[in-house]
Amino acid sequence: MVLQAVCVMIGEVVNGLIRFSQEQEDAPVKITGEIKGLNKGKHGFHVHEFGDISDGCTSAGPHYNPLAKDHGGPDDVDRHIGDLGNVTAGDDGVAKVCFFDKQISLIGKNSIIGRTLVVHADPDDLGRGDHPLSRTTGNSGARVACGIIGVAK
């Protein structure tokens, strides 16, 4: 049985629909969809700790990081579980999303169900920059759209 989740992302200008699917608990999660209204280029893309958007994207809290690791890129061993790297928008402001992640899950101890997915204004430096925020947020700037990740039918 394939597990599925969905996230409707809403911002003032940016919006999108992201789907998640997973074959079983220890399998990678496939992340697909599209985000519209972005500036051309890379944008940080993260799962945040709380499924709370009562005060916009700011109430989602920090990146989902139950193992208390430094910020990193999606292929790094040492990273927040919620660190999904960047999505890239084209000239039309649309980021088409299609990749797999091995650390998030839709079931079990690293489940992202009920947490918030956020896309940021700036590129995620993957924890490799000189800015003081690099090791906590990737210095990826403002939260331009977000949504709570829910179970899909």
Image (cartoon, helix red, strand yellow):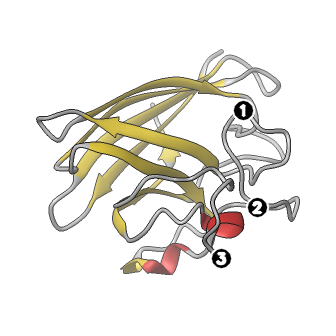
Relative image position of residue 78 (x, y in whole percent): 84, 47
The residue type indicated by label 2 comes to Asn
Residue highlighted by disc 2: 65
Task: Work out which residue is located at the far right of the displayed protein and give it.
Answer: 67
Relative image position of residue 34 (x, y in whole percent): 29, 34
Looking at the rendered image, the quarter that the N terminus falls into is: top right
Evaluate whether residue 49 shows in this view.
no
Q: CA distance from mark 1 to mark 2?
A: 15 Å
Q: Which residue appears at 74% of the width and 54% of the height?
A: 80
**With 134 as the anchor, is 41 left or right in this view?**
left
Foreground label between 1 and 2: 1
Foreground label between 3 and 1: 3
Residue highlighted by disc 3: 132
Q: Which residue appears at 21% of the width and 33% of the height?
A: 90
Q: Are marks 3 and 2 in contact (CB under 8 Å)?
A: no
In which quadrant of the rendered view does residue 47 lie? bottom right
Residue highlighted by disc 1: 75
Earlier in the chain: of badge 1 and badge 2, it is 2
Task: Work out which residue is located at the far left of the displayed protein and give it.
Answer: 92
